[in-house]
């Protein structure tokens, strides 16, 4: 049995359907149609203690819904979930003592008062013993460099400063698991780096299990060895980031601008799509090199322009999304 | 328990920061109080018969109402709670190892106590030194005063128990403007805040006595001015207590049901 074990979790939301326009609005005032949206559909995976897992997927894929189910906030329609021997939504109060959550787009700090006051409140909420609290707080202040900002009302902090305080607030009770839902959203490069380094250190020193969602692939590459890709509510890929990179880096996208008609059949060319101005080719770089390809093509047609997609993790993800049609 | 008290304390501290809102509140309450007082003075001087309260009683009632409005009114909403429900910040509240109902209960209590602390003293002082017959009078007796204090405390606990229902309902409706506003208006009218209960028609008085709203502020204020006997006061306080218990139990049940159905807004 793994530390975190999730089996066939599904969650459906009812969404009111409403067409635009006055007439439709009036109609829907009397009779509302609902459509069911499957936010999460039959998701299963398991995570070991001390792992950092990057949970990725496009907007609306079901990432946040999963995080909310795992943190006991939402109750799934069906499926099982055992985390550290507990079911989040059944043992909610006992369970949430063991976890920390950071929602990058929300705030848990009280707006009008300094972050330290919120920390004191959290100490009472989590019933942290005084000595342990002081030690943890001191440690977090040092590591996240909060000395100068902890006594300023939160409304006067910059986003980066606030996010550092938010992360500290989520860790005061030394949780075994940390859920980070887009923790670097809107942060500048330096703040992002601080957050990443901190999470890395935390995982190393305290063996905290971290589940992280982000749209910034740099976060994922810096932190997670393993990624889970989710799209339209399904798990599409679960494995190491390295493997994915190797698999996708062999593929290159070549866009050719031409007015001529191209007929080509050669080993290594995996796909050919006619576009408005020419063709998009997908080639396997192991089987056919770019120069070889150009050699063949330039003999057949006039190339007006050519574009070769360079590989970086973001474009791998874009391809991945394309491949899975999400 | 300690956590709830700290919750209350923080809410108190952060509400105390809005001093200009408090000054505006004082001015508004003084103005409205004065309008109400003038209306009743005119009404009494035009020779109304069989009036249920003496003029000095009703004026004291009105000033108490205005001075303590921030504590006992039934139309103020804890904007912060509605905001976190609308924008999804409620996620954090649900990720805490505490009973959400009582977290919200103490938040609202803290807010109300903070608001009234800032407004109460200036209003009491100003209205006490007003010339006869426009002034706030003293309590009917020491015992009346003590029972006023006790029933005011119970009334506060009751109005908070009532106010917690609004965010709980909003967890499902997602917007507090529909059913919640409707409920608030009904509660407000039946509480005696606009017209004291003794001035209600007989049938409405009977209906109202079976509802919780008049036990929030009408009972303590009438005890203070001596419009209710001490025995009736004790009886009223028992009813207050029963309503508090009913509301807290009911609130917890509805909260538990609604948490299961909750949809967190926005990503």
Image (cartoon, rainbow, N blue to C red):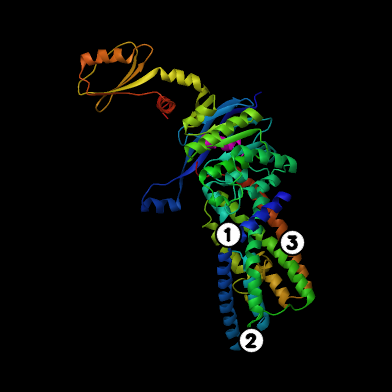
Q: Are marks 1 and 2 in contact (CB under 8 Å)?
A: no
Residue B49 marker: 2
A298 or A117: nearer the viewer = A117
Instruction: Give x and y (percent) for residue A98.
Output: 67, 36
For residue A318, above or below residue B237 = above
Q: CA distance from mark 3 to mark 1?
A: 23 Å
On the image, numbered disc 1 is attached to which residue? B77
Q: Tell me the crowding category of disc 2: few under 14, some 14 to 19, or many 20 or more residues within 10 angstroms, Cα based.
A: few
Q: Where A304 sits versus A106, above or below?
A: above
The magenta stretch spans which residues? Answer: A63-72
Give the number of the disc on residue B241.
Answer: 3
Say which of marks 1 and 2 sits in front.
1
Q: Residue at x 65, y 68 (%)?
A: B208
Label 1's element?
loop
Chain to which mark 1 belongs: B
> CA gap, disc 3 to disc 2?
35 Å
Q: Position of residue A232 (x, y in %)?
A: 47, 32
- Cα gap from disc 1 to disc 2, whole angstroms: 39 Å
Marks 3 and 1, the one that precedes in the sequence: 1
């Amino acid at each position: 049995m793994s530390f975190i074990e999730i089996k066939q979790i599904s969650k459906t939301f009812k969404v009111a359907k409403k067409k635009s326009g006055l007439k439709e609005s009036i109609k829907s005032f009397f009779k509302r149609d609902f459509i069911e949206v499957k936010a999460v559909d039959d998701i299963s995976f398991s995570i070991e203690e001390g792992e950092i897992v990057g949970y990725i997927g496009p907007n609306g894929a079901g990432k946040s819904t999963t995080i909310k189910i795992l943190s006991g906030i939402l109750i799934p329609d069906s499926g099982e979930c055992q985390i550290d021997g507990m079911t989040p939504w059944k043992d909610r109060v006992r369970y949430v003592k063991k976890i920390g959550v950071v929602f990058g787009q929300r705030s848990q700090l009280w707006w009008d008062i300094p972050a330290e006051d919120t920390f004191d409140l959290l100490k009472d909420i989590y019933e942290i013993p005084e000595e342990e609290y002081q030690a943890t707080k001191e440690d977090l202040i040092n590591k996240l460099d909060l000395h100068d900002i902890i006594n300023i009302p939160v409304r006067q902090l910059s986003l980066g400063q606030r996010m550092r305080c938010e992360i500290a607030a989520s860790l005061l009770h030394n949780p075994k698991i940390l859920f980070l839902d887009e923790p670097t959203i809107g942060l500048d490069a330096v703040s992002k780096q601080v957050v990443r380094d901190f999470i890395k250190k935390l995982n190393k020193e305290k063996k905290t299990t971290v589940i992280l969602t982000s749209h910034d692939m740099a976060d994922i590459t810096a932190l997670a060895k393993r990624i889970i890709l989710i799209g339209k509510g399904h798990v599409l890929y679960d494995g190491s980031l390295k493997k994915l990179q190797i698999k996708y880096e062999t593929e290159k996208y070549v866009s050719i601008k031409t007015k001529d008609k191209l007929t080509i059949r050669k080993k290594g060319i995996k796909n050919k799509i006619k576009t408005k101005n020419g063709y998009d080719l997908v080639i396997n770089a192991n089987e056919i090199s770019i120069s070889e390809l150009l050699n063949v093509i330039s003999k057949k047609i006039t190339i007006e322009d050519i574009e070769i997609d360079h590989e970086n993790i973001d474009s791998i993800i874009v391809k991945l999304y394309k491949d899975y049609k999400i | 328990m300690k956590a709830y008290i700290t919750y209350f304390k923080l809410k108190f501290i952060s509400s105390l920061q809005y001093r200009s809102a408090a000054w505006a509140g004082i001015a508004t309450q003084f103005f409205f109080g004065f309008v109400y007082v003038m209306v009743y003075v005119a009404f009494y001087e035009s020779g109304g018969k069989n009036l249920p309260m003496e003029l000095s009683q009703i004026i004291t009632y009105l000033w108490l109402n205005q001075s303590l409005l921030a504590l006992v009114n039934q139309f103020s909403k804890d904007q912060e709670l509605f905001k976190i429900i609308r924008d999804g910040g409620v996620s954090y509240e649900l990720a805490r190892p505490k009973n959400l109902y009582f977290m919200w209960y103490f938040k609202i209590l803290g807010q109300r106590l903070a608001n009234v602390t800032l407004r109460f003293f200036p209003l009491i002082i100003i209205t006490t030194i007003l010339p006869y017959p426009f002034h706030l009078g003293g309590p009917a007796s020491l015992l009346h005063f003590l029972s006023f204090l006790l029933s005011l405390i119970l009334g506060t606990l009751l109005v908070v128990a009532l106010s917690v229902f609004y965010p709980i309902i909003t967890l499902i409706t997602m917007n507090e403007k529909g059913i919640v506003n409707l409920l608030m208006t009904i509660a407000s009218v039946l509480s005696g805040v606009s017209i004291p209960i003794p001035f209600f028609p007989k049938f409405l008085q009977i209906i109202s006595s079976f509802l919780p709203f008049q036990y929030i502020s009408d009972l303590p204020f009438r005890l203070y001015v001596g419009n209710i006997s001490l025995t009736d006061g004790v009886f009223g306080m028992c009813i207050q207590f029963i309503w508090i218990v009913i509301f807290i139990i009911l609130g917890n049940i509805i909260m538990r049901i609604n948490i299961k159905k909750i949809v967190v807004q926005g990503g």
